[in-house]
Image (tube, coloured by chain):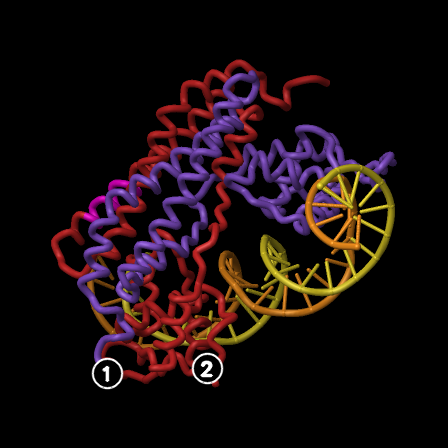
Chain colours: A red, B purple, C orange, D yellow
Amino acid sequence: MARDSGLPATAYVVLGLVSIRPVAGYALMGFAERSIGNFFPLTRSHIYSELDRLRGLGFLASTEVAQENAPTKWVYEITSEGRDALQRWLDDTEVGEERWRNLFLVRIFFGDHMSTEQMTGLLDGYEAAARARRDHLAAVADWLADRPGSVFRRSTAMFGVHREQAKLDWVAEVRPMLLAAAASGLPAHCQGG
Amino acid sequence: MARDSGLPATAYVVLGLVSIRPVAGYALMGFAERSIGNFFPLTRSHIYSELDRLRGLGFLASTEVAQENAPTKWVYEITSEGRDALQRWLDDTEVGEERWRNLFLVRIFFGDHMSTEQMTGLLDGYEAAARARRDHLAAVADWLADRPGSVFRRSTAMFGVHREQAKLDWVAEVRPMLLAAAASGLPAHCQGG
DNA sequence: TTTGACATGTAAGCCGTTACATGATTTA
DNA sequence: TAAATCATGTAACGGCTTACATGTCAAA
């Protein structure tokens, strides 16, 4: 009787991705990046170790597949035990508060240590990155709009669009007051003494 | 010569909070929750260990303070070395891509495993939590609007307002299609066989 | 009398990242 | 000939969380 609880979320995410279709570790890396990379990034190293653990638990079965013009690969496939474990996790898991750590906002919070030039650079960089991600995700969502059966995936892309748009809206709203505040106060390391 | 690089971001965040005013570990817990909890949550255990490390590096100095009606506490204060290290970190640190893991979106992504009832419950819960956080952060931002010198802190609260509002907007936009998709497909565990 | 606020830590342990390591094939 | 893609792993390490542990005082 394989354990099915106590695994980290990452394990179930990998299990879920493999459940869509059999896949090798290397290919899974790209698939994960394109599908859930927007909200659940995975490293290559981590993928390999999770695949190995899931295989050890009997949730995945692996098959060696020889290829022409490429190294032999191990293709993983979900087992019925794995399907049960995944379903149970999806049913049982409470979606609690997430764990976000936003270093950009840390920088804003300690904004009195910055000059106006630094603040402008920070905001410009943030804005540019948000705009690029928004446009990319909007294109993905548009592309998915055509094909049926992609509602869930498309919805996650649209979440990203809203998320990045919110950042842009925020920058537009607070930029004037942040720059004014950065201009009014001397950098902290120039004060006192 | 104390090392000032290679410390995790959390260390500098704690250092930065103490730099605002001298504080004991327990009080810092509440202060962190109210000030940066919105985008950089800290656990009590972690706070204590970081304070200890920063003291060992000479970035913080600690003083024992006796109290009436309460246990003796250790109050931490930033040193000039600590101030230098903090400033250097704020200057040097590149604000790269953050690390977000959103289990809620994982659930949406695997939405074909859900019934319409489950989907409705998921969305309702998410919406309610987002609305509560938005309203709370909006109240915080309003409260901070009155007092001068709180621009940076207020801006981080407003970021949260935009962030939560984006979630609400997203739910409003995708709810119909998510429910339709959940209704059209049988739950995965009822298919085939 | 029991809950909650105040106050401070230790210990265990997984999670996850980064760096290390290798090698074939194709393309520029 | 150099870089990029395909392909798979190991090892070390720190970060961070969870659980364990203790004690006073005030208020309900």
Nearest the viewer among C23 and A20 is A20
Does the segment drawn in magenta span residue B182? Answer: no
Callout 2: SS: helix
Name which residue type carries label 1: Gly
Does the segment drawn in magenta span residue A135? Answer: yes
User: Which secondary structure is most common in the magenta stretch?
Assistant: helix
Q: Residue furthest top?
A: A184
Tell me the residue at 28%/63% (across/down): B115
x%, y% of residue B140?
A: 51, 29
Which residue matches tag 1? B193
User: Taking D23 as reference, is A98 left or right?
Assistant: left
Name which residue type carries label 2: Gly
Q: Which residues are magenta?
A: A133-141
Nearest the viewer among A105 and B112 is B112
Toward which corner of the image does residue A63 lie, by quadrant?
bottom left
Judged by depth in the image, the label closer to the viewer, 2 or 1, is: 1
Nearest the viewer among B52 and A122 is B52
Number of the label disc, if any, that sits on residue A56: 2
Tell me the residue at 45%/66% (across/down): A46
Q: Residues within 10 Å of mark 1 (few under 14, many from 20)?
A: few
Toward which corner of the image does residue B112 lie, by quadrant?
bottom left
x%, y% of residue B118?
A: 33, 60
